[in-house]
Image: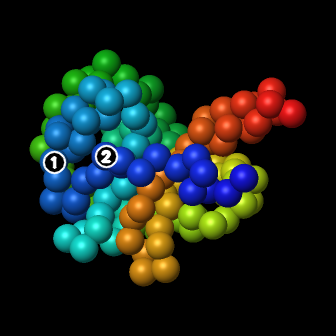
Amino acid sequence: MIVKDIMTQSVKTANSDTLIKDIASVMCLNKISGVPVVDENNALVGILSEKDILKVMFPDVARVMEDGVKPDFESMEADYKNILGKKACDLMTQSVASVTPDMPLLKAASMMCLKNIRRIPVTDENKKLIGIISIGDVHKAIFQESLLN
């Protein structure tokens, strides 16, 4: 199997100026954990995951160790509202791995495992977004294939 056999082509995306509030709404309503960030030409410029949004609230471990103060997680949770006004470009991961549609499925899965990511964009030769696959998509496809043989 190759990536294009299982990739999702109708991908929810954001642009660099999209507010985190709007992206979080899309994630929650569509039960997805991340979105590719594209420019006006649909070229991949980043990716934003739930983890990218939430980790902004976490205390800096070095500072906690230095100050010796226990973090107040309840007040940190209240700071979430402040994050909602930020833009995708403020929190997105800019260095994004991607795969091609003709890549073997297990090669794409190995990239996700090595990079410790759960989804990876599919791009064409011009780095334009054409789809996305998740580690769950890969597992489901391989499981289904094994049942047929």
Residue type highlighted by circle 1: Leu
Describe residue 104's horizontal placement relative to residue 44 as left or right: right
Q: Residue furthest bottom?
A: 126
Q: Quadrant of the image for the C terminus?
A: top right
How busy is the neighbourhood of tag 2: few (under 14 within 10 Å), some, or many (20 plus)?
A: some
Which residue does the image show at 22% across and 62% down from the upper left? Answer: 16
Q: Residue furthest left?
A: 85
- Report the number of numbered marks: 2
Describe residue 4's horizontal placement relative to residue 148 as left or right: left
Residue 23 image position (x, y, % from top left): 24, 42
Camera sees residue 72: no
Q: Label 2, on which residue?
A: 12
Which residue does the image show at 37% across and 23% down from the upper left? Answer: 73
Kind of element beneath mark 1: loop
How busy is the neighbourhood of tag 1: few (under 14 within 10 Å), some, or many (20 plus)?
A: some
Residue 19 badge: 1
Residue 62 image position (x, y, % from top left): 50, 48
Residue 144 image position (x, y, % from top left): 72, 31
Residue type highlighted by circle 2: Lys
Vertical order, 142 against 116 (above or below) = above
Q: Residue furthest front?
A: 148
Identify the coloring: rainbow
Which residue does the image show at 75% across and 31% down from the upper left? Answer: 143
